[in-house]
Amino acid sequence: MLFQRLVRAAAGGIVIGGLLASFGGCTTTPPSEPVRLVWPPPPLTARIEFVRSIVSDEDLGHDTTFSQRLLNFLGGEMPAPNRIVEPMGLAISDDGQRLYVSDFAHLAVFVFDFPLKKFTKIGSEEKLARPVGIALDAQEQLYVVEQEKKGISVFDRQGKKIQFITHPSVERPTGIALDRARGKIYLADTSHTKSPVHVVKVFNLRGELIGTVGHDKGSEAGEFLFPTYLAVDTQGNLYVTDTLNSRVQVFDPDGKYLKTVGSRGSAWGMFDKPKGVALDSFGNLYVADSGWSNVQIFNQKGDVLLFFGGRGPIPGMLKNPTDITIDKQNRIYVADYLNHRVEVYQLVNTTAADSLLNPSAQTTQGGDIETKKTATQ
């Protein structure tokens, strides 16, 4: 069954410690065999494998292995001019060839075109007003949430602004998701502490406000306390990270509440400050938790399957991740905020059947709270 027993996954932190010990006395000679950082660790079947870090435009010239990236990290790296500083939003093209990264500090969106080895910065001429969430439509037009402008700027493939979407009711927008099939734009209005309403606003493609998702500010089902990031599945269901309620809420295409995934706590399947959400090709839900500095995976029933990452500066580990996106080949991109990079992972050795848990596996899923804390902090 998928990812087997969760408590074993905590050993990923032990693997990292072993790598540091192995490389502690050598920063010039690569290991004889490439190091694989996987979750869960051997002897269990690997399900998530760390692939690479994306730090700057220099990473377009070569696909640095984990072993070499780790050696560079231990030896110290000079920052590149176009280095990622504060990644807040991610989007990947439909063909998986171009990665878009919104950078809150650079006031720009970085575009990494891997086949062409081309780097573009949207915002190099006219700075963006604190870009956060981003999304792509079927034509690969880029939708950027500009927090200071309280709206969404839309850019064509050449980086030319073609539309601005807002409404007087928008207070502090953060996340965005597109329902291409239904022509809807979802905008998470995170709002402020004193704001009476925390909702997700719904626009059509003409930029007209056509509704909201959620009601009132609170902790009941269908209520939000600082909603941040969004995702839409193939059925048009909307996933909202209800960050300060430490949960993800799910709504149908008409905005009707369906279910809640996770809750506040330190055991398996619980959150501290969930942010980015994404879905793989099997419909499994991935949630980046800024507080735990990891990503947890849930099946469609809401059962927790695995976590990967954990707090640390070494490549493959995370520090306060923000957004997450997954391409059609189940390659996973995580905005690693305080490590100033994007971490890339791959779902491996997995089929749709692996998302199901048998009853005996479910009995172990409460996990060991202290084990999880040790592995993720």
Image (cartoon, grey):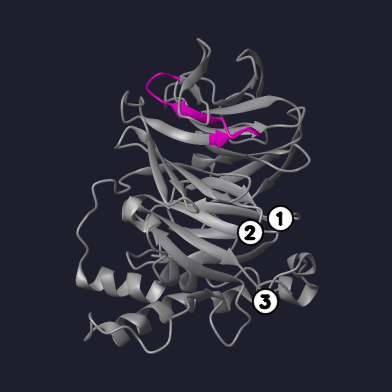
Who is closer to the viewer here, 335 or 296? 335
Q: CA distance from mark 2 to mark 1?
A: 7 Å
Q: CA distance from mark 3 to mark 2?
A: 19 Å
Residue under label 3:
4
Q: Is residue 213 magenta?
A: no
Residue 300 placed where, x, y %?
A: 75, 54
Q: Which residues are magenta?
A: 135-150
Cβ–Cβ below 8 Å for labels 3 and 1? Answer: no
Q: Quadrant of the C terminus?
A: bottom left
Residue 85 placed where, x, y %?
A: 30, 46
* Mark closer to the chain start, 3 or 1: 3
Q: Is residue 368 above or below residue 296?
A: below
Residue under label 1:
281
Who is closer to the viewer here, 170 or 62? 62
Q: Quadrant of the N terminus?
A: bottom right
Q: Is residue 141 magenta?
A: yes
Residue 248 placed where, x, y %?
A: 61, 44
Cβ–Cβ below 8 Å for labels 2 and 1? Answer: yes
Residue type, numbered disc 2: Asn
Residue under label 2:
330
Q: How many marks?
A: 3
